[in-house]
Image (tube, coloured by chain):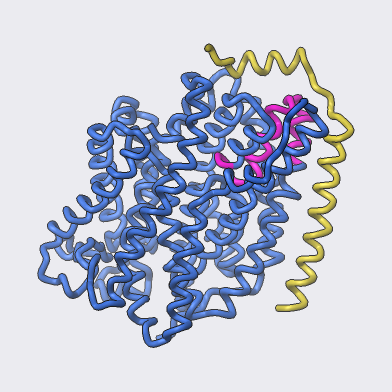
Chain colours: A blue, B yellow
């Protein structure tokens, strides 16, 4: 069972199981690193003249379904698209079965769940690539269509999320049957590791802009930890009467990074395991609401400031999966709107800024948990023999970030050392990106399946939800917007020429 | 071991209210104050170098 699936079932989670959840999280982190690096390394085969992943499936914007699918590389042009699709499925199933084995999952149920997850997710991607949904205005003449919704093919993410929500809320039997494969954290973290290489290419092409984005991204840390957290903690303690045990994980869940931060804080202040688990279930549901609303608000109000919108997604949307997913949707929506007015932004920069901001916030979860553990054990709830160890910072560090940084630096390093290799690295990252998109897609679907909105109406959750609504929509979103504006106003993604 | 339900937790919080300790107030306002000051510094730095 995935960590988040378990987290959304607080009433059935025992204390030993909750402790195991925290351990599982670490395992999922490392597995995401290894899976992401495996795909990344295979894609680098192109640098040595070996097209290892060229058979993987891609979907282009289509008017005729028969012409939609094709292998990623021209070297495999003769491969039937159906075989390419099956090969992609089998490759992902094989590596994820190894991961499932490490996570102690039931492999038969995982295989069944993953098969349904893959088929439905890819069907959403296929549908989202239909020209009438995806084509931007500049592409309509070539596709010979009079109109389109201009959502780009990443609208497949939104369709996957909606389908997942329908299954999660209306088909509980099916949702239960799939649960072994519903692991959005594993999928999004793997996608983020692969994304590092893709962003490395973007940084190679625009080094000055990339440096500027990274420096501005650091500012996000100040906001999440020092400006959001104390106010949410104060509101929940002073006005809602929550105990310290509840208020601290709640403040971290709402302010920092959802599930990971709530668990790390709960553990730091020695809260009972049930506390961060309940907070996390709330975070996941609200993250879905944000994911469905904020990218469209960003497209409507911030299309003139794409990187403000990007940073806003990273600062306002909680949980890694939903935040990066919001970045992906915002990227496609804003680029589509800009394309309609004749400006074609380079893809990936909005997603890249959103991910950078989120990753910087994640990096300090361990440090923050350490600081809280020290304050709680030495000042608030003094306990004999309680010692806070520095090793806890490392234990709580989200390990998938190491994979993200590694792929980013490897691509950047190769590109700087051998500029002649840049076209080949770009092609290699294009192939790795095929899998990044599929992992994204499965994340959207999985988030939808596990978001049980009825839980919000359960007796007792209203007060917890009230703090969340008040702080998120009354404070965090607006302060996040202000600070994104302060740091990213006037900074634009590169424009594609021609 | 049976886990407490949310309703029971909220009832318990009503009866066993924990007032804000001075150290908590200090944590809240020192954190927030340092955040605002750092933010102002970072804005100035980013303006100076952009």
Q: Is residue A25 highlighted in magenta?
A: no
Q: How many marks?
A: 0
Q: Is residue A27 above or below residue A440?
A: above
In the rendered view of the protein, which quadrant contains the C terminus of chain A? bottom left
Magenta span of residues: A231-260
Residue A28 lies left or right of residue A172; in this view the side is right
Q: Residue at x 59, y 31 (%)?
A: A276
Residue A314 horizontal/vertical position (percent): 58, 55
Task: Work out which residue is located at the far front of the displayed protein and give it.
Answer: A385
Residue A348 horizontal/vertical position (percent): 46, 68
Q: Is residue A438 above or below residue A112?
A: below
- Examine the rendering and report whether any part of residue A337 can be seen: no
Q: Is residue A325 above or below residue A110?
A: below
Residue B29 horizontal/vertical position (percent): 85, 44
Q: Residue at x 38, y 87 (%)?
A: A420
Q: Is residue A232 highlighted in magenta?
A: yes
Q: Nearer the viewer, residue A47 or A302?
A: A47
Q: Nearer the viewer, residue A164 or B3?
A: B3
Q: Is residue A172 above or below residue A313?
A: above
């Amino acid at each position: 069972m995935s960590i988040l699936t378990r987290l959304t079932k607080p009433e059935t989670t025992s204390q030993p199981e909750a402790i195991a959840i925290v351990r599982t999280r670490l395992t999922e982190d490392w597995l995401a690193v290894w899976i992401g690096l495996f795909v990344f390394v295979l894609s680098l085969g192109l640098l040595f003249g070996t097209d290892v992943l060229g058979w993987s499936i891609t979907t282009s914007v289509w008017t005729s379904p028969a012409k939609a699918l094709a292998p990623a590389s021209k070297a495999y042009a003769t491969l039937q698209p159906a075989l390419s699709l099956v090969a992609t499925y089998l490759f992902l199933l094989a590596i994820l079965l190894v991961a499932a084995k490490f996570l102690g999952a039931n492999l038969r149920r995982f295989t069944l769940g993953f098969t349904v997850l893959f088929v439905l997710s890819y069907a959403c991607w296929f549908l989202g690539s239909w020209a009438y949904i995806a084509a931007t205005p500049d592409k309509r003449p070539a596709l010979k269509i009079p109109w389109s919704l201009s959502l780009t093919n990443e609208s497949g993410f939104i369709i996957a999320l909606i389908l997942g929500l329908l299954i999660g809320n209306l088909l509980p039997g099916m949702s239960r049957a799939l649960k072994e494969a519903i692991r959005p954290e594993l999928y999004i973290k793997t996608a983020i590791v692969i994304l590092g290489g893709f962003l490395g290419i973007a940084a190679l092409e625009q080094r000055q802009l990339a440096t500027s984005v990274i420096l501005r991204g650091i500012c996000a840390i100040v906001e999440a930890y020092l400006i959001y957290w104390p106010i949410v903690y104060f509101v929940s303690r002073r006005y809602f009467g929550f105990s310290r045990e509840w208020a601290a994980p709640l403040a971290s869940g709402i302010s920092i990074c959802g599930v990971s931060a709530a668990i790390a804080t709960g553990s730091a202040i020695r809260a009972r395991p049930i506390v961060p688990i309940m907070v996390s279930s709330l975070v996941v549901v609200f993250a879905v609401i944000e994911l469905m609303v904020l990218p469209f608000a960003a497209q409507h109000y911030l299309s003139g400031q794409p990187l403000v919108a990007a940073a806003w997604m990273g600062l306002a949307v909680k949980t890694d999966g939903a935040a990066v997913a919001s970045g992906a949707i915002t990227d496609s929506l804003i680029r589509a709107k800009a394309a309609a007015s004749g400006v074609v932004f380079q893809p990936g920069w909005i997603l890249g800024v959103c991910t950078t901001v989120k990753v910087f916030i994640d990096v300090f979860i361990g440090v923050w948990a350490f600081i809280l553990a020290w304050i709680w054990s030495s000042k608030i709830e003094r306990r004999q023999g309680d010692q806070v160890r520095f090793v806890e910072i490392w234990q709580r560090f989200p390990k998938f970030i190491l994979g993200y940084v590694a792929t980013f630096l490897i691509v950047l390093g190769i590109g700087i050392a051998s500029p002649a290799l840049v076209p080949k690295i770009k092609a290699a990252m294009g192939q790795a990106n095929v899998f990044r998109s599929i992992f994204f897609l499965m994340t959207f679907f999985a988030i939808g399946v596990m978001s049980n909105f009825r839980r919000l109406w359960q007796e007792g959750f209203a007060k917890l939800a009230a703090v969340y609504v008040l702080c998120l929509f009354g404070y965090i979103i607006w302060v996040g917007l202000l600070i994104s504006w302060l740091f990213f106003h006037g900074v634009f993604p590169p424009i594609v020429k021609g | 071991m049976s886990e407490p339900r949310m309703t029971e937790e909220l009832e318990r919080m009503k009866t066993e209210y924990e007032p804000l300790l001075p150290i908590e107030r200090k944590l809240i306002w020192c954190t927030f104050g340092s955040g605002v000051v750092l933010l102002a510094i970072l804005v100035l730095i980013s303006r100076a170098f952009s």
